[in-house]
Amino acid sequence: MGWLSKSKKKEDDDDVLLRRYRETGDLAVLGRLYDAHAEMVYYVCMRYLQDSERSKDAVMQIFEELIHKVNKQEIQKFGSWLYVLSRNHCLMQLRSEKNRQQISIDDYVEFPMPMHPEDDAGEKERQLSALERCMERLPEKQKRSVDLFYLNEKCYKEIAEITGYSMNEVKSYIQNGKRNLKLCMEASDGKR
């Protein structure tokens, strides 16, 4: 069996287990589905949390999140969806702990930011503070759309459903918000 066939088989297995869990609510089925991806979840957590004990705890917390989220969201590929969920869990944990020195600004936004390897934790902290200030300055509709898209990993359709905006408005708010954030960040970078 080739690599592609194994990959397709894994997706099929995921789909079968996901469907079975949704039909039965049997946590043992969800556990089997999660176990198949637990190693990936652990490595994602290690990448962000940089501590094996905290990562092990996060693996358990993410499983608990699954119980609540798996029935509420449309999932095309479970592995990809779980990766995003795991990454977001770690980012939110770091953010809530104010442990910002371990977070790259690039993990929060998907547009280029000037970050240099010689930058220290104080510089990263300054840039994160500037990003938060810039987010607050965005018009409300842009801020809400950007927050849902980048920090909560919602798709355009989900954002439209949550906010009541049309798909075209959502796309426009995200694009304009992203541009305005970049301009604001560049302006605050020049004020040093």
Image (cartoon, grey):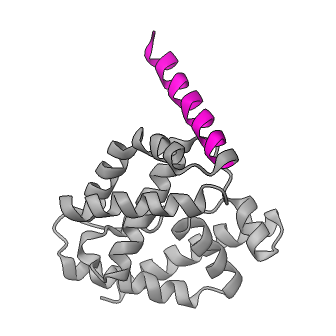
Q: Position of residue 172 (x, y in %)?
A: 73, 68
Q: Above or below — where is 52 with respect to 23?
A: below
Q: Residue 68 is drawn in which quadrant?
A: bottom right
Q: Judge left or right: residue 29 versus residue 57.
A: right
Q: Position of residue 183 (x, y in %)?
A: 51, 77
Q: Position of residue 136 (x, y in %)?
A: 54, 89
Specify whether residue 49 is painted magenta.
Answer: no
Q: Residue 186 is drawn in which quadrant?
A: bottom left
Magenta part, dominant SS: helix
Nearer to us in this view, 161 or 115: 161
Q: Above or below — where is 122 with respect to 156?
A: below
Q: Judge left or right: residue 175 versus residue 188.
A: right
- Answer whether residue 121 is visible to the viewer in this image: yes
Q: Position of residue 187 (x, y in %)?
A: 44, 83
Q: Residue at x 65, y 79 (%)?
A: 144
Residue closest to the far top: 1
Q: Judge left or right: residue 107 versus residue 126.
A: right
Specify whether residue 16 is painted magenta.
Answer: yes
Q: Above or below — where is 29 with respect to 144?
A: above
Q: Judge left or right: residue 137 versus residue 19.
A: left
Q: Residue at x 45, y 12 (%)?
A: 2
Nearer to us in this view, 160 or 114: 160
Nearer to us in this view, 174 or 59: 59
Q: Residue 173 is drawn in which quadrant?
A: bottom right
Number of disc labels: 0
Q: Residue at x 29, y 88 (%)?
A: 192
Q: Residue at x 42, y 65 (%)?
A: 89
Quadrant housing the N terminus: top left
- Answer whether residue 113 is visible to the viewer in this image: no
The magenta stretch spans which residues?
Answer: 1-22
Q: Above or below — where is 116 with respect to 177?
A: above
